[in-house]
Image (tube, helix red, strand yellow):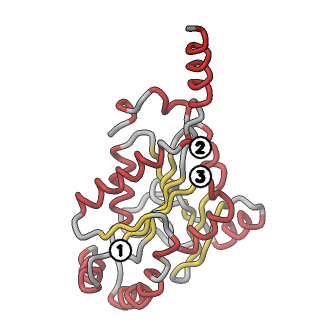
Amino acid sequence: MSSEHAGAEDRGRRGLMLVLSSPSGAGKTSLARRLASEHEDVQASISATTRAPRPGETEGLDYQFLSAEAFSAMVARGEFLEWAEVFGHRYGTPRAQVEQALHAGRDVLFDIDWQGARQLEQTAYGDLVRVFVLPPSVDELERRLTARAQDSADTIRVRMSKAAQEMSHWAEYDYVLVNDDFERTYRDLEAILMAERRRRRRQLWINGLVSSLSKAAQAR
């Protein structure tokens, strides 16, 4: 559903922060990219990272690629909503772009790990919706990591060894999806987004509507 199908009331709501986390290979990045591409009112948070670009990745589209020194300077200035070290590299979410989107009524999508989600809980709990994505099996997780051909065999072994620790944090999330069928999992993710947009605290236009309805009813 693109923004052209959204109700007029969506223009008066506060955006939400939709966090997707999973062990590497479970499918969170594919889900995030599909959601952002099909919903014009959802924008992906572009994380900053100290790691080198992978084949096919573009500066400013996939990540902001920073030197270790530049990343540390942003941390010192308090310019990240969250940051963490993962597999020897640092990743962080720049604060300014997210706050601007939320105030404009746009949803911001985060593809981050449990450490980042835990930090966001400290700084932006009221805006946060957390979804953990699980693989259907360990064998399938390893198959997906191998099939995407982005990492060496040694890196895949490290990612697999970390998977159990990452999955142990599933209970810290609001929703858990098992990605055994991508299309079904994606539809479930869309349903979560639609429901969370309708939470009372995010619909800033409701007070005005109720006030006008009350006045009209009293005038009858």
Looking at the image, which residue sits at the far right?
Answer: 77
Q: Secondary structure at mark 2?
A: helix
- Gap in Å between the C-alphas at discs 2 and 1? 29 Å
Q: Which mark is residue 201?
A: 2
Looking at the image, which residue sits at the far top?
Answer: 220
Question: If you read the primary sequence from the N terminus, does the residue marked by circle 2 or circle 1 appear first?
Answer: 1
**Location of residue 191 in the rendering, given as x and y in whole percent from the top left corner:** 35, 50
Residue at image position (49%, 61%) is 19
Q: Which residue is mark 1?
A: 134
Direction from residue 122 to residue 190 in the image, left or right = left
User: Mark 2 is on which residue type?
Assistant: Arg
User: Mark 3 is on which residue type?
Assistant: Asp
Between 131 and 91, the residue placed more toward the observer is: 131
**Location of residue 44 in the rendering, given as x and y in whole percent from the top left corner:** 47, 52
Which corner quadrant of the image does residue 186 belong to? bottom left
Quarter of the image for the N terminus: give it: top left
Q: Which mark is residue 75?
A: none
- Gap in Å between the C-alphas at discs 3 and 2? 10 Å
Q: Residues within 10 Å of mark 2 (few under 14, many from 20)?
A: some
Frontmost of labels 2 and 1 is 2
Vertical side of 186 occupied by 132: above or below: below
Direction from residue 113 to residue 70 in the image, left or right = right
